[in-house]
Image: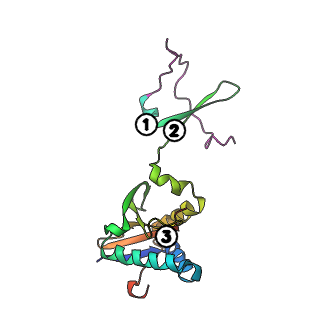
Amino acid sequence: MNPIIKNSDFQKVASSVKPDAKNRVLLKKNLLKEDTSYHIYVNRLGQIVLDPQASIPAYEAWLFNNPEAIASVRRGLNQAAQGKIARVDIKNL
Amino acid sequence: MFEIYWTAEARANYDSLKGNAAHLKQYKAVRKSINLLAQDPRHPGLQTHEYDTLKGPAGEKVFEAYAEQNTPAAYRVFWYYGTSRGILTIIAITPHP
């Protein structure tokens, strides 16, 4: 599968939509999230994909750019979700 | 005072520092930061701040605390308030590149 397409289960949400005089295509409001930006991709067939992008605060980006660190945090979160936690003996740390 | 819990991941992170003579300084810094978390999670030395991009298992706010400052590969402690009042859970302890 193309790495941009994470799920190929597309559903038609509108038919025969034409660009307006300013070449804009209007989308239904519930398709878009406020404060989300989009990368736009097009293939040789002229099919267009909008890929929503979540913005990450700059001071948090290091974690997501560090595979080992984010993997460790995700493992910890999964364990916490499964109740795999233990009390820390502060005096004998 | 908060009661501190940690995940198996956080404990493994901590134990890998504790058993490594080359990381003695980092081990002491992390141990001190855990003690500070138990006393006061908002202690200025921890520079605790919320992480917008992470949530705890029940949607809790996740925080990052600094174990060291102005140090290359400084360690950071990720934690959240819970599982109940007066308890704080450490998710992971990881170096900052």
Magenta: main secondary structure equals: loop
Mark 1 lies on residue:
A33
> Can the viewer see residue A63?
yes
Expressed as whole percent of the image width and height from the top left, the position of residue A59 reads: 45, 53
Magenta region, residue range: A1-28
**Residue wearing tag 2:** A52
Instruction: Give, as a three-letter code, the residue at label 2.
Output: Pro
The label number, if any, that marks residue B87 in the structure image: none
Q: What residue is rendered at 50% in x and 75% in y? A: B26
Q: CA distance from mark 3 to mark 2?
A: 31 Å
Q: Quadrant of the C terminus of chain A?
A: bottom left
Looking at the rendered structure, the kind of residue marked 1 is: Lys
Instruction: Tell me the subunit letter for badge 2.
Output: A
Q: Position of residue B5 (x, y in %)?
A: 41, 76
Q: Position of residue A20 (x, y in %)?
A: 49, 14
- Asked whether disc 3 touches disc 1, contact meaning CB atoms under 8 Å apart, the reply is no
